[in-house]
Image: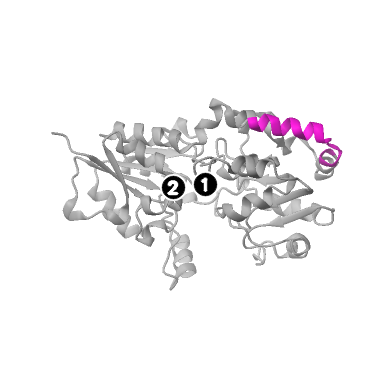
Amino acid sequence: MQGVKRIFFIPPGSSARTGKHLLEDLNLVFLDKTFFDFFRERGMELYTIDAWRPESHNDKEDALAVFNHPDEGFLLRAFYYLKFAGKGRGKYSVDKKTLNVLLGAFSRKILFQAEPPIVMPWPYRHMKKLKKEYSSVFSTIHLESEGVKYFILPYNYTDRFGKNKIGEHFDAPKEKFLVMINSNARPHGYFKYELYSERLRAIKYFCDKPGFDLYGVRWDRKPFLHWSYAPYVKKVWRGSIPGDNIESKLPTLAMYKFTLLFENSTFPGYVDIKLLDPLVTGTVPVYLGAPDIANYIPKGCFIDMRDFRTYNELEKYLRAMSDTERERYRSNIRDFFRSEQAKVFTPRYFAEVVHRAVQEVF
């Protein structure tokens, strides 16, 4: 008789160090209960890797799913070691030595490379090696020509926030003009695709314009590459809102008519879930990122920053927009959330992607 298949997750970040299983803290990998129920109904159980024990390992029934293979470059590993030393956590869920043990123990291994090359360059530079190491490899950027499958990160815009949250924030009064909620960061590779510096150029332009506010983490620091922008940041920075702090982020976004939304890079297919935040709040996003964004979010739901030659042109367009025209964008957003197209961002859809991947390796 066939046993219950078990999938052990190595979640992104330092989540696995918490000692919690996925069902005890659904925010660990931004999934919800329906994701786990989906697998249980199909005879599979999901656990974080801290639940795995070598003595109970059954290679015929167990599979390993890794979210983000860590950078193996010496300089980056040394940087993260020094950065997190003594803080009880790390940049990645498991260290290289532990990951190698796990990869050796499991015959069935699936990699979901969620971070783009701008953040984690090593896996993309060594994709041929990883394709030999793993049974199947997925990425959030399009690399199908290299034999890598594509996936979209899930966004729990209903189940995660509650059924009424969309209406609550969507219909909130939009009395403020323009906001930007992005972190202050720098690229680690593939520099020609980065948009971190574009965030700074936008801040420099809008810092003296009425009605512009900046939120996000690390803007109170001065990275050595961007020290000259500190005076512009100081004028408009209103405080830290981590990207995953929905309790603060959504009510803040809901106060504004528009938001400047920069991805960290311009790779085709890379659509970060932060684009869904302003759509949930009915704040019209001014977007710059994936060049093929209209394949995932309808053009009528956002303003494409590439349509404007300068920030001055963009500002004039936003300030001249009538309430009627802005409401058209918001109506399109409502239609999007009711459409089949929105389903690719749901945990259910992601569960189907993972389930197919697991079935293929068994």
Left or right of 265? Residue 130 is left
Numbered disc 2: secondary structure:
helix
**Residue 332: percent from the left, percent from the top?**
68, 29
Q: Which residues are magenta?
A: 317-334
The residue sitting at 40% across, 36% down in the picture is 351
For mark 2, what is the residue? 123
Q: Quadrant of the C terminus?
A: top left
**Residue 150: percent from the left, percent from the top?**
46, 34
Q: What amino acid does circle 1 point to?
A: Pro
Numbered disc 1: secondary structure:
loop
Give residue 342's quadrant in the image: top right
The residue sitting at 72% across, 32% down in the picture is 329
Q: Which mark is residue 66?
A: none
**Residue 311: percent from the left, percent from the top?**
80, 45
Q: What amino acid does circle 2 point to?
A: Pro
The one of 157 and 57 positioned closer to us in this rendering: 157
For mark 1, what is the residue? 117
Contact (Cβ within 8 Å) of mark 1 with mark 2:
yes
- Count how many numbered circles sit on residues in the image: 2
**Residue 110: percent from the left, percent from the top?**
34, 41
